[in-house]
Image (spheres, rainbow, N blue to C red):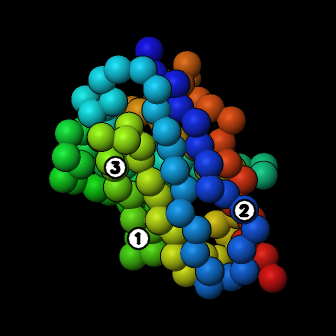
Amino acid sequence: QVQLVESGGGLVQPGGSLRLSCAASGSGFSIYAMGWFRQAPGKQRELVARITSGSGRITNYADSVKGRFTISRDNAKNTVYLQMNSLKPEDTAVYYCNIYPALNTYWGQGTQVTVSS
């Protein structure tokens, strides 16, 4: 069983940056592909970025964040990161991490990201 805790959200101006962290407890973190997801008010949760298991050699991004967001992982720290640059107001959402494909039992509280001037 894996438990996931997201952190690093906050209020940032358009064009700013944030780095989100997702700390995993439990064993076997490195065997899981991981994903960052987000849910904006009134919208469905969507996949933002994902990274393969192990060394995380392969990453994929939603078109809306490609070139601005970077997902990475540190298996020694059981943590996956999302570096978000050039933030836009439309990036405002609650951000969640999960294994990929996501399992309902692993959703955490998420971390709020608000992009506003």
Horizontal side of 9 relative to 54 (left or right) equals: right
Residue at point 72%, 80% (across, down): 13
**Quadrant of the image occupied by residue 9:** bottom right
Horizontal side of 16 relative to 115 (left or right) equals: left
The residue where tag 3 is placed is: 73
Q: Which residue type does callout 3 highlight?
A: Arg
The residue where tag 1 is placed is: 66
Q: Quadrant of the N terminus?
A: top left
CA distance for labels 1 and 2? 21 Å
Can residue 64 be seen in this snapshot? no
Query: Considering the numbered disc 3 on the image, is that residue within a helix, a strand or a loop?
Result: strand
Q: Outermost residue toward the front?
A: 76
Query: Considering the numbered disc 1 on the image, is that residue within a helix, a strand or a loop?
Result: loop
Q: Which residue type does callout 2 highlight?
A: Gly
Query: Considering the numbered disc 2 on the image, is that residue within a helix, a strand or a loop?
Result: strand
**Quadrant of the image occupied by residue 52:** top left
Label 2 crowd (10 A; few <14 / some 14-19 / many >=20): some
Q: Earlier in the sequence, mark 3 or mark 1?
A: 1
Q: Considering depth in this image, is 29 or 117 the residue closer to the camera? A: 29
Residue at point 35%, 55% (across, down): 72
The residue where tag 2 is placed is: 10
Q: Considering depth in this image, is 80 or 116 the residue closer to the camera? A: 80
